[in-house]
């Protein structure tokens, strides 16, 4: 066969195969366009009051969808014309085959320039130049352009629909939880301006209200495209703001739960606090009594002064009891936590004070015990009547059982008795050593 402007003239088998391929493409494109037309996201976009990025993208996408149908209609007309020519006769003539070749391979499809002007102005896609009265395309080029327009349009529709499907419902659920938390907070006195958690609830409320309005009017502002993905709708909704507020609400809820726990066991905690402070007071009183005893019985020693019970803690305890009486649980909660720690610290301080004050008495008791232990030891060995031991024992004993007792001198006396006992127990030797 001869050749034309589009290359060699197709034979009948090539024409039939081309028509079958184009028919299959036509059916696939029509199915896709109808699915896009019926897509829930597209219907929502048509009726929505859009703003920002979504408004701009949807204007371009609407024009692209209109152009898609224009291209598809032109493609349908060209395919119908080709089928009509092929069906004229069973064995197509050379003239028919030349005409079919030009129709199937050449730029035989003409689309009015006005149909592409809007899309060209709104999207940086190669839909042809502007200012022309019409554009001519081959069927293959037209299919490529339809696929391109379909992919970009579907990407926009799927992204908006994904955000609308994911975020508003979650925001509504979180808002419902927020409302329940606000009611619970109000019941325990956690209110804006009176408690930080109340201020947090107000801020979360404002943020969620604003977020929902923005998501509904500009869903694409909350869409994160997948990196390196060319598939329509590749990406995910941006839930950063939602997740942050959900965490903030959970923190507030934990604070409210803590306040509720305070309301439940406040009386028991107050009773325990009173008991701890009472034990601290009794310990300090014991330390003051012990200090007088030490000053009377121990000579030449420094005895620390014992302070009185802190009145500030008693005042705070009275304030806590008043908060409980008035049901101001949000105020009682942090005060109880602070008081519990301070009360334990006060009891520890009182015990340390008693230990410090009675340390000299403990030293004297240890020396007395050591003296008696060595006396019993030498008695078991039949040495209790030794004159040197008896002399040193009596000297140490008088010092330890007299008042006031000089601990330093008494300790030296006990050490001399120990040394003499050790010498006797180790064997015969001169018992009248130095210091005898």
Image (cartoon, helix red, strand yellow):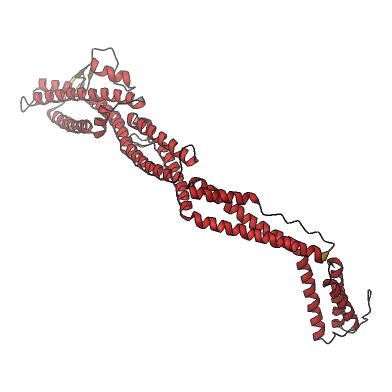
Q: Residue 226: x, y in percent?
A: 38, 36
| Residue at x-position 78% and y-position 64% | 294
The image quarter containing residue 166 is top left
Image quadrant occupied by the N terminus: top left
Q: Which of 349 and 204 is in front in this view?
A: 349
35 versus 432 height, above or below: above
Residue at the extreme bottom of the image, as rendered? 382
Q: Report which quarter residue 284 is drawn in.
A: bottom right
Residue drawn at point x = 12 percent, y = 25 percent: 80
Q: On the rendered structure, is 363 left or right of 420?
A: left
Please determine whether, in this image, residue 386 is positioned above or below residue 84. below
Q: Where is residue 317 in the image (x, y as percent from the top left)?
A: 57, 51
Residue 114 drawn at (x, y percent): 24, 15
Residue 256 visible from this viewpoint: yes
Say which residue appears at 36% left-offset and 26% top-offset: 53
In percent of width and height, residue 239 lies at 39, 38
């Amino acid at each position: 066969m001869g050749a034309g402007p589009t290359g060699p003239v197709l034979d009948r088998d090539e024409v039939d195969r081309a028509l079958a391929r184009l028919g299959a493409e036509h059916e696939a494109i029509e199915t896709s366009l109808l699915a896009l037309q019926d897509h829930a996201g597209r219907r929502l976009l048509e009726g929505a009051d859009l703003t920002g990025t979504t408004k701009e993208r949807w204007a371009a996408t609407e024009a692209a969808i209109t152009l898609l149908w224009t291209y598809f209609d032109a493609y349908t007309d060209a395919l119908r014309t080709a089928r009509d020519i092929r069906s004229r006769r069973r064995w197509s003539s050379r003239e028919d085959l030349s005409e079919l070749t030009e129709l199937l391979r050449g730029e035989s499809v003409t689309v009015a320039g006005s149909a592409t002007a809007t899309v060209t102005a709104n999207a940086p896609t190669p839909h042809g130049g502007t200012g022309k009265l019409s554009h001519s395309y081959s069927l293959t080029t037209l299919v490529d352009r339809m696929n391109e327009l379909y992919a970009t349009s579907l990407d926009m529709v799927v992204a908006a629909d994904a955000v609308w499907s994911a975020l508003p419902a979650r925001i509504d659920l979180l808002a419902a939880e927020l409302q329940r938390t606000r009611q619970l907070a109000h019941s325990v006195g956690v209110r804006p301006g009176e408690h930080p958690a109340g201020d947090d609830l107000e801020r979360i409320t404002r943020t969620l209200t604003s977020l929902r309005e923005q998501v509904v009017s500009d869903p694409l502002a909350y869409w994160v495209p997948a990196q390196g993905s060319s598939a329509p709708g590749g990406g995910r909704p941006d839930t950063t703001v939602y997740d942050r507020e959900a965490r903030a609400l959970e923190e507030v809820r934990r604070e409210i739960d803590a306040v509720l726990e305070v309301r439940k066991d406040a009386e028991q905690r107050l009773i325990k606090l009173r008991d701890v402070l009472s034990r601290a007071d009794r310990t300090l009183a014991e330390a003051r009594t012990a200090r007088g005893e030490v000053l009377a019985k121990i000579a030449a020693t420094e005895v620390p002064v014992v302070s009185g019970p802190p009145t500030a803690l008693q005042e705070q305890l009275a304030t806590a009891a008043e908060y409980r009486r008035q049901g101001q649980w949000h105020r009682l909660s942090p005060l109880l936590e602070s008081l519990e720690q301070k009360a334990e610290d006060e009891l520890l301080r009182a015990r340390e004070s008693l230990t410090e004050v009675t340390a000299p008495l403990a030293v004297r008791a240890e020396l007395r015990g050591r003296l008696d232990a060595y006396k019993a030891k030498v008695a078991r060995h039949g040495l209790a009547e030794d004159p040197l031991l008896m002399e040193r024992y009596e000297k140490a004993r008088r010092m330890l059982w007299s008042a006031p007792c000089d601990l330093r001198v008494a300790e030296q006396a006990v050490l001399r008795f120990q040394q003499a006992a050790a010498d006797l127990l180790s064997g015969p030797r001169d018992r009248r050593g130095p210091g005898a």
